[in-house]
Amino acid sequence: MLELQHVKKYYQVGDTVTKALDDVSIAFRRQEFVAILGPSGSGKTTMLNALGGLDRYDSGDMIVNGTSTKEFKETDWDAYRNNTVGFIFQSYNLIGHLSLIDNVEMGMTLSGVGKVERKKKAVAALERVGLGEHINKAINQLSGGQMQRVAIARAIVNDPDILLCDEPTGALDTVTSVQIMELIRELAQERLVVMVTHNPDLAHEYADRIVEFADGQVKEDSNPYQEKTTNSDFKLKRTKMTFATAIKLSFNNIRTKKGRTFLTAFASSIGIIGVAIVLSLSNGFQKQIDATQTKTLAKFPITISQVATDQSKAQTAADSSDKVAKNKGYLVAAKDQSESAQHTNKFTPKFLKYIKNIDPKYSNNIGYTRLTGMNLLRQINGKVSTVKFSNADGSGQNLQQSLSSSSGVGVSVFPEPLKSGQNNFLKANYKVLQGSYPQKATDIVLVVDSKNHTNINALTNLGFTVKNGQKVNYSQIIGTTIKVANNNAYYQKLPTGNFVPQQNLTTAYNNSQRQLKIVGVIRAKKSTNMSLLAPGIAYSDKLVRQVIQDNRDSAIVQAQKQTNQSVLTGETLTAETKQQLIATLGGSSVPASILIYPNNFKDKDHVLHYLNQYNKGKSKADKIVYTDLAGTMTDLTGGLMDAITYVLVAFAGISLVTSMIMIGILTYTSVLERTKEIGVLKALGARKKDITRVFDAETGILGVASGILGVVIAYLATFPINSILYRMTDLANVAQLNPVHALILIALSTVLTIIGGHLPARMASKKDAAIALRSE
Ligand code: ADP
């Protein structure tokens, strides 16, 4: 049933060629016990390995059940070892980290036999070799003879046709040797047993046939056999290790060296810890930066004034002034630099509409400052008097000064959200100390600073009698009502054609419908540190627009439009001051300046792009010049932070690569350590792929473990880091590990370690089974 025909196997080491098998032709019966005797190095093991498909022959042929193995592929050999052959070695070759049962089951596990059947067969085999009572023992609790019995059980559990034994009693004492030989003889009743031995006595006592080997050749054969040509009835069942088996093998192996595995996982998790901490820090810093950006933008919005300074021109002027010109014997008549950099922005209705159409995604708040004054009247103790929204010291002003001051020295107009409910400027940046946020255009608020101070002038200009440092109850302020008189009610025309405020303000007061109310006292949220709204009164742009609506066609505006003399004071006006006065009187709705508050620096870039888009193709005079003060800070903070993050990530990345190399080295040592196991698995029919899989599974487990360990340690580390940072910088909760990042890092760790371990795993799979088994 098994025949070698002119089989040759030569080993070449350096210049010497060893003829391990030198034209061996021998046939074996279906059932017999053959002992191979011969001096050491005569080629016995080489032949046994060839018979078992552990090693390839160089030339000749081996016939199994009438089938030539010449055309066998790698997987055919794997299946052949698994289905047809059982091996018994001198050194037992059990897998130490597996249980007794698992060792015996391994061959069946590889060929995909179901769990229940596997167990049944394994137990039967163990009982057959006399280990029925020791089934639950660990391998290292067994004696040498018992271990060899386990190996025999493993070899016969699949009921192979051929049993190959390589000095099975070589490591056993005489008594045990006899027991094992008895067992093998019993097994030889059912199959072909080929046994290599050094011991002629045992061979002669137990074997049916003795073959003497010398110098790679058969010298003597006590009972030669001539194989008759039989029809090929040889079918092989392919082997395949499932991933679960690979995981189980690796897991058991890892379990036997917990300490080392933990240290390995910890060491390789350091890279992950580094990256995770850097990520969580930059995460937190990014949040801080975003907050700072919003703050900065609230302080330094994009500003478009009717009269603007072209920053770029001012810049180039400053640059060129660095160089000192030579004395060329002449001088140049030139405009003053700041003057030449001056630009008048044309706030055409088209442009104002363009501004209104800024994508609310990028900027929710647009503020307008207008020169418009308001004729404010307040009834105090039954008497109506003029009051002002102003932080200016009220004494000693003429009418026109007081008019323009009523349009806003330090008085704040807060931007309205473009769409109601969206990122309301006040709600986002201010909190109400008492009262409520403004709901209507006529609702106004009093702003206090972080120390709850407000400008005393704001109060006195409103008619409150307060002394410096005096404490004022919120309730004294909230609920105060003020009326806005329109121009026609407020001004009376003198016969000279000039206008003066009505003598009887009570009538004007009673005739006025528009009533303002102080609805709340607000303060910047500490987190934003906003100083946009100066302490004092603040009101909405909507109110201003309503007042302009009221006064646009008033008599005083009409009159002023027709003369170049002030209708209030009679002084002569320039074109510019005339326009200003008309605007102050409410005759113009064109804002003096526009303030755009983007949500963050990135959005600001979008807004700037949008503004530049407007300028495209326009003549120089029609272009809009804006000021972006916050812009100068962007590059600094943003760029610096990016640089720091890159450097940190690079460092962490290096440690990640280091841990990957370390995993590689560790897998390599594991491969070396488990060389025997690889040989055993191969002898049992494991494919190259299966071996790779075992080691991939091991590194995979290590990768997951080190990933999880790293993430957990990094997460725990964020607490002390945060408390240190808080003490140092006042920034709370800077380090925040994003759960998504954590998951990605675990995956990354797994992938990297598998990559790092895959090369050694491949090397392991390529190990020659015969050599692997010879290794100690
Ligand atoms: P035996 O089992 O009879 O002691 P072997 O079959 O182990 O002999 O070895 C036969 C010859 O082949 C010996 O000379 C041995 O040194 C040589 N040999 C075996 N394996 C290798 C190998 N992998 N590389 C080189 N020489 C080898």
Image (cartoon, rainbow, N blue to C red):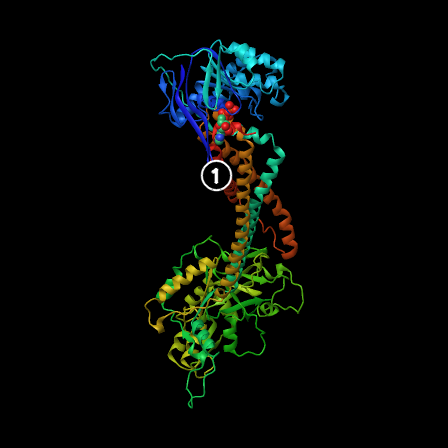
Label 1 environment density (alpha carbons within 10 Å; few <14, some 14–19, many ≥20): some
Residue reaching furthest to the bottom:
329
Residue 109 seen by the camera = no
> Does residue 343 appear left or right of residue 669 in this picture?
left
Q: What element carries label 1?
A: helix
Q: Residue 269 location in percent, x, y? A: 57, 42
Q: Quadrant of the C terminus?
A: top right
Q: In this view, does 133 lie above or below 630?
A: above
Residue at (61, 37) in percent of width and height? 262
Q: Residue 692 location in percent, x, y? A: 47, 33
Residue 2 seen by the camera = yes
Image quadrant assignment for residue 605 = bottom left
Q: Residue 356 location in percent, x, y? A: 40, 61
> Does residue 274 appear left or right of residue 51 in this picture?
right
* Residue type indicated by callout 1: Leu
- The count of marks equals 1
Q: In which quarter of the image is the N terminus?
A: top left
Closer to the camera, 475 or 51?
A: 51
> Does residue 313 appear left or right of residue 463 in this picture?
left
Closer to the camera, 185 or 404?
A: 185
Whether ligand 1 has any atom under 8 Å from the Cβ at mark 1 is answered as: no
- According to the picture, the residue beneath numbered tag 1 turns out to be 759
Q: In this view, does 616 lie above or below 325?
A: above
Q: Residue 484 location in percent, x, y? A: 49, 66
Image quadrant assignment for residue 65 = top left
Image quadrant assignment for residue 347 = bottom left
Residue reaching furthest to the left:
617
